[in-house]
Amino acid sequence: MMMSYLFQGWNCRGPAKYRDMLLDIGTEEMAHVEMLATMIARLLESSPVEAQEDAAKNSAVRAVLGGTNLNDVLLAGINPQHAIVTGGGAAPNDSVGFPWNARYTIASGNLLADFRFNVTAESQGRLQVSRLYELTDDRGVRDMLAFMLARDTMHQNQWLAAIEELEQDGLGGTPVPATFPLDRELRAVAHQYWNCSESTASSAGRWAEGPAPDGEGTFEYLAHPTPLGPEPELGTVDPRLHGTPPVPIPATTK
């Protein structure tokens, strides 16, 4: 989230209030990373070897530590990188040791698309922090996570308010991007709900009837949508690609 917010802010071409807000929250998220790294480092101050020895008192974990399967080690809650790579410190990795990379950064240049993504990111973040809170009874950890939960509450509200303000400022609307001419899309299917399963329980949802949120049409529920074209048939592949042909290749003679 931190890098997404910062790049969204650095690239922002909208009113200054949006750029300033993005850089404010991006900088705060950087501080959150510092807090989490400090927490992890302090929790790892006791010898990782001793921690593994304690865990090995469980027979299943002891078998795992014997080197049977790395996935089992990770599932048991033991990340060898904390001892081998970081020397008992935090690392910019996910919970199974996969390193962060720039692909996590979302900055499309469309503020409404980005802000909607940010709501999702904060929602997932708060969900995972709440689960971490329930997994520990350490008072200090819970105090810090309680702070994180409250800030994630603020940030969810912040992005929802920013989305509302963007729309009021005429800088975005549904669907994204609002600047693409609607007459260039196939409008006949723009508000159709296609039921693609045996059940029709989805027909009871708000998305199945009534005016669409974009104000440009009314939802239509198709319980049995029909194919829009024939089943695709592929031609013969170039033999130089050595692909699987649609029919057997006849034997060649010299």
Image: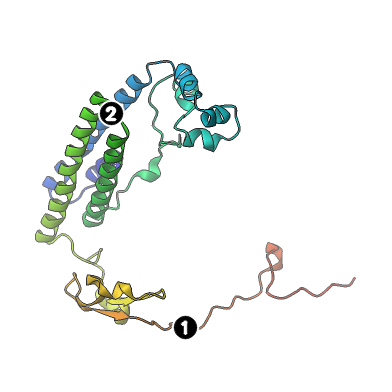
Residue type beneath disc 1: Gly
Q: How is the image coloured?
A: rainbow
Residue type beneath disc 2: Asp
Residue 196 percent location from the top left of the image: 40, 74
Q: Which mark is residue 137?
A: 2
**Residue appearing at x 22%, y 54% in the figure:** 111
- Determine which quarter of the picture holds residue 3: top left
- Determine which quarter of the picture holds residue 94: top left
Residue 120 versus residue 5: which sits nearer the camera? 120
**Residue appearing at x 23%, y 50% in the figure:** 119
Q: Which residue is mark 1?
A: 229
Could you tell which of marks 1 and 2 lies nearer the N-terminus? 2
Mark 1 closeness class: few <14, some 14–19, many ≥20 residues within 10 Å: few
Q: Does residue 128 lie above or below 193 as drawn?
A: above
Residue 176 versus residue 73: which sits nearer the camera? 73
**Residue appearing at x 49%, y 19% in the figure:** 53
Residue 164 percent location from the top left of the image: 12, 57
Residue 235 percent location from the top left of the image: 63, 76
Find numbered disc 1 in the image and state the secondary structure of the residue it sits on. loop
**Residue appearing at x 46%, y 29% in the figure:** 78
